[in-house]
Image (tube, rainbow, N blue to C red):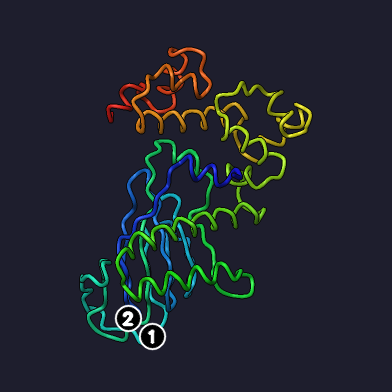
């Protein structure tokens, strides 16, 4: 498993669909921000729209475009095609094929948009994805799109149109795949801001990240990490800091505590045992590190504090 796949698995993101929107020309909808631990996403099945974040960043989307909002930001969606419908025309809420449906009450329906969220139980999600841009998109159309991506988009359209049993589960799973593809495209672009995703996209540093993600409990001193990268210690420290905008030690701690948080919620193992698995030699050291990062002890976090 590569580092990007391992990261997505570690964070435990799972997609869920909120609704399908069928909107007429000129319609605008305001979408609220997501709570902590959630990333919003949209997939355009047909038509065109403009997505504008509260801060002013805007992105034009067309059929086959998938966009995720890593910070769960509030935003506005405006339909770009078709004749402008009556300004006061209401939006109706219905259900279609097992999906919640929001549609314009009048005018030609020109935008078909899936809206959902990616939910994570990790309390460190914000730190892991802190350096991602406000919008993270991938297009499943055009000459740059692979046949596999185009087939994926077609499958989603068919599932939604048919409305067969299990459509929500199927489309949610495909949305998970689309988010991973968007992360990959961002990592491979080479022009993203320094941060975790740039780190994973670097050939040598990504190898180090994968090793830590696989075995967070190993003794990951600076020299051991540099050896994993095949670099001198000084060169490794310099390149890692430039790519990730954090120290190797901070990255190791983040991975360890993310894994520990998942084990605390998913198992009944003792905190000392979990701390040892992720690399802490004593329960006291584990408790200190966990509380420093999350503001509460492992026991309190397990209780849902």
Q: Which mark is residue 161?
A: none
Q: Quick check: 280 left or right of 96?
A: right
Tag count: 2
Q: Measuring from the top left, give residue 21's x and y in whole percent.
A: 32, 71
Q: Name above or below for residue 78 compared with residue 53.
A: below
* Quarter of the image that includes the N terminus: top right
In terms of image quadrants, where is residue 242? top right
* 235 lies left or right of 273: right
Whether residue 296 sits left or right of residue 100 in the image: it is right
Q: Secondary structure at mark 1?
A: loop
Q: Which residue is mark 2?
A: 24
Q: Position of residue 143 (x, y in %)?
A: 63, 75
Give SS at disc 2.
strand
Mark number displayed over residue 82 = 1
Category of crowding for the residue at label 2, using alpha-carbon neighbours closer than 10 angstroms: few (below 14), some (14–19), many (at least 20): many
Determine the image quadrant of residue 222.
Answer: top right
Q: CA distance from mark 1 to mark 2?
A: 7 Å
- Whole-percent x and y of residue 49? 42, 73
Q: Mark 1, residues whose alpha carbon is within 10 Å: few (<14), some, or many (≥20)?
A: some
Q: Point out the image quarter for the C terminus.
A: top left
Q: In this view of the protein, which residue sits in the foreground, 282 or 129?
A: 282
- Point 37% across, 48% down: residue: 119
Residue at the image position 20 percent from the left and 73 percent from the top: 92
The quadrant where residue 235 appears: top right
Name the residue rendered at 35%, 59% in the picture.
169
Mark 2 and mark 1 in contact (Cβ < 8 Å)? yes
**Front-lying residue, 138 or 241:** 138
Q: Earlier in the sequence, mark 1 or mark 2?
A: 2
Residue 184 is left or right of residue 58, and the answer is right
Query: In the current view of this chain or complex, which residue is farthest to the front?
Result: 165
| Residue 71, horizontal then vertical, whole percent | 43, 49
């Amino acid at each position: 498993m590569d580092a990007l796949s391992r990261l997505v698995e570690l964070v435990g993101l799972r997609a869920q669909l909120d609704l399908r929107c069928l909107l007429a020309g000129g319609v605008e909808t305001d979408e609220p921000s997501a709570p902590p631990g959630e990333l919003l996403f949209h997939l355009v099945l047909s038509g065109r729209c403009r997505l504008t974040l509260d801060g002013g960043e805007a992105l034009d989307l067309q059929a086959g475009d998938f966009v995720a909002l890593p910070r769960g930001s509030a935003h506005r969606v405006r339909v770009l095609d078709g004749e402008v419908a009556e300004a006061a025309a209401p939006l109706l809420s219905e259900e279609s094929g097992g999906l919640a449906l929001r549609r314009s009450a009048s005018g030609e329906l020109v935008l078909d948009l899936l809206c959902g969220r990616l939910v994570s139980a990790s309390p460190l999600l914000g730190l892991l994805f802190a350096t991602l841009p406000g919008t993270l998109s991938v297009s499943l159309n055009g000459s740059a799109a692979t046949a596999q991506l185009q087939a994926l988009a077609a499958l989603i359209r068919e599932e939604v149109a048919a409305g067969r049993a299990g459509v929500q589960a199927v489309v949610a799973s495909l949305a998970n795949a689309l988010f991973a593809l968007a992360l990959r495209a961002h990592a491979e672009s080479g022009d993203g801001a320094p941060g975790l995703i740039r780190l994973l996209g670097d050939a040598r540093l990504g190898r180090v990240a994968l090793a830590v993600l696989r075995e967070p409990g190993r003794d990951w001193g600076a020299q051991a990490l540099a050896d994993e990268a095949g670099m001198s210690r000084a060169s490794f420290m310099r390149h890692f800091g430039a790519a990730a905008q954090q120290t190797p030690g901070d990255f190791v701690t983040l991975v360890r505590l993310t894994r520990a948080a998942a084990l605390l919620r998913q198992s009944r193992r003792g905190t000392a045992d979990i701390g040892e698995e992720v690399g802490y030699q004593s329960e006291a050291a584990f408790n200190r590190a966990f509380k420093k990062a999350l503001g509460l002890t492992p026991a309190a976090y397990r209780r849902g504090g």
